């Protein structure tokens, strides 16, 4: 009896090595492509996103570099007044028909010294289309939000 192999078929699970998180088991639906990379890491195009304990925190692990991992937060769950308009050109790049197709997550920077608060980059969030699995970082040049907005992660974790 021969075994049928589907050309181009995705595996049901993918094991990814993370220097910080250990071995991660990802489904194809957990992986995303950033066609232009992300700021500071233009060569990094493939990432996996996993929940970090609740629906407000996530880890984004590079599938290409085991040492590259980011902590992300849902900015709408943390900042009551956060609002952005994703330009139609960005929606088209992500294969989205309307803004509701897109989820936004923001980078968290952990403090360098004890006593300092973590910060969130609200000016350069990630726009993610979970249907097409394409994503990009959007920088709002004229935004009223900053790149290092203090956040109390205890409220996020609770």
Image (cartoon, rainbow, N blue to C red):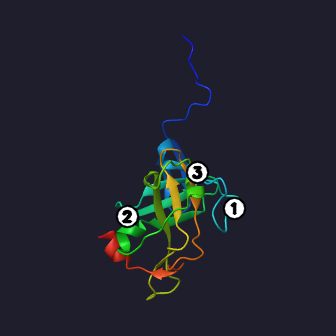
Q: Nearer the viewer, residue 136 or 101?
A: 101
**Distance of mark 1 from mark 3, alpha carbons?**
20 Å
Which residue is at 61% across, 54% downward?
34
Whether residue 51 is visible: yes
The residue carrying mark 1 is 42
Location of residue 132 with respect to 38 vertically, above or below = above
Q: Disc 3 or 2, which lies upstream in sequence?
A: 2
The residue carrying mark 3 is 92
Q: Disc 1 or 3, which lies upstream in sequence?
A: 1
- Where is residue 115? Give x, y as percent: 43, 89
**Distance of mark 2 from mark 1, alpha carbons?**
26 Å
Q: Are marks 2 and 1 in contact (CB under 8 Å)?
A: no
Q: Which mark is residue 56?
A: 2
Location of residue 118 with respect to 35 vertically, above or below = below
Q: Quadrant of residue 37?
A: bottom right
**Distance of mark 3 from mark 2, alpha carbons?**
26 Å
Q: Quadrant of residue 62?
A: bottom right
Where disc 1 sits, the SS reads loop
Q: Disc 2 or 1, which lies upstream in sequence?
A: 1
């Amino acid at each position: 009896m021969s075994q049928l192999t589907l050309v181009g078929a995705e595996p049901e699970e993918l094991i990814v090595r993370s220097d910080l998180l250990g071995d991660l088991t990802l489904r194809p639906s957990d992986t995303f492509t950033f066609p232009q990379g992300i700021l500071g890491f233009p060569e990094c195009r493939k990432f996996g996103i996993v929940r970090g304990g609740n629906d407000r925190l996530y880890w984004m692990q590079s599938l290409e570099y085991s040492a590259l991992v980011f902590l992300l937060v849902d900015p709408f769950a943390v900042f009551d007044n956060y609002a952005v308009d994703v330009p139609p050109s960005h929606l088209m790049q992500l294969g989205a028909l309307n803004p509701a197709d897109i989820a936004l997550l923001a980078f968290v920077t952990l403090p360098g010294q004890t006593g300092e608060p973590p910060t969130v980059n609200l000016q350069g969030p990630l726009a993610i289309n979970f249907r097409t699995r394409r994503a990009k970082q959007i920088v709002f040049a004229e935004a009223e939000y900053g790149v290092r907005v203090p956040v109390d992660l205890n409220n996020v974790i609770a």
